């Protein structure tokens, strides 16, 4: 997880004050509705076995959007996202905005992390 943050901070060092980095375990993410988790931003699924599983973004609620992938059964090689539901070994790393005026940075950060972390499941775009 530290490596994912370091990759983002290295490239976006001048902009990181626009983001709040939060970690929430997947086994508690559905129930944890803290305001800082429910903001626009970029989410990264991280797991000790797979590393970065998936990178995505939401312009409204990154935690909620990230959890929708479990119900969507996104597939990657031998991993179905649905099997991660409630997994204590999987963490969501949320790079959420502090201010809506910085919404445009979400697209840049998501694309950068997708390209530079080699997620197990790539976006279909």
Image (spheres, rainbow, N blue to C red):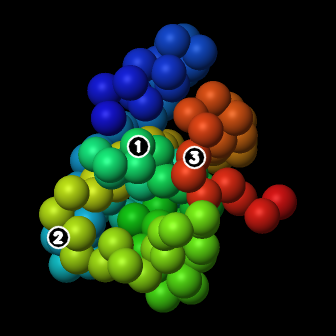
Of tags 1 and 2, the one toward the viewer is 1
Q: How many marks?
A: 3
Helix, strand or loop at disc 2? helix
Position of residue 1 relative to residue 59, above or below, is above
Label 2 Cα crowd, 10 Å radius (few <14 / some 14-19 / many 20+):
some
Proximity of marks 1 and 2: CB atoms separated by less than 8 Å = no
Helix, strand or loop at disc 1? strand
In the rendered view, does 119 fall on the left or right side of 45?
right
Proximity of marks 1 and 3: CB atoms separated by less than 8 Å = no
In the rendered view, does 41 fall on the left or right side of 23?
right
**Disc 2 to disc 3, how far (Cα)?**
22 Å
| Residue found at x 23% / y 69% | 87
Residue furthest out toward the front: 78
Q: Quadrant of the N terminus?
A: top left
Position of residue 21 relative to residue 54, above or below, is above
In the rendered view, does 49 fall on the left or right side of 6?
left
Q: Which residue matches tag 1?
A: 51
Mark 2 or mark 3: which comes first in sequence? 2
**Disc 1 to disc 2, how far (Cα)?**
19 Å
Mark 1 or mark 3: which comes first in sequence? 1
Position of residue 110 relative to residue 86, above or below, is above
| Residue found at x 41% / y 19% | 6
The quadrant holding residue 60 is: bottom right
| Residue found at x 21% / y 57% | 89
Of tags 2 and 3, the one toward the viewer is 3
Position of residue 103 relative to residue 87, above or below, is above
Q: Which residue matches tag 3?
A: 119
| Residue 57: percent from left, percent from top | 59, 56
Proximity of marks 2 and 3: CB atoms separated by less than 8 Å = no
């Amino acid at each position: 997880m530290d490596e994912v943050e370091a990759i983002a901070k290295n490239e976006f060092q001048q902009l990181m004050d626009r983001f709040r980095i939060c970690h929430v375990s997947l086994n508690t993410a559905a129930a944890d509705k803290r305001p800082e988790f429910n903001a626009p931003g970029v989410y990264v699924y991280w797991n000790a076995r797979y590393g970065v599983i998936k990178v995505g973004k939401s312009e409204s609620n990154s935690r909620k959007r990230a959890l929708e992938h479990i119900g969507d059964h996104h597939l990657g090689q031998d991993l179905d996202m649905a099997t991660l539901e409630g997994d204590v070994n999987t963490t969501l790393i949320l790079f959420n905005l502090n201010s809506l005026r910085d919404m445009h940075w979400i697209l840049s950060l998501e694309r950068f992390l997708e390209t530079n972390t080699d997620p197990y499941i790539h976006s279909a775009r």
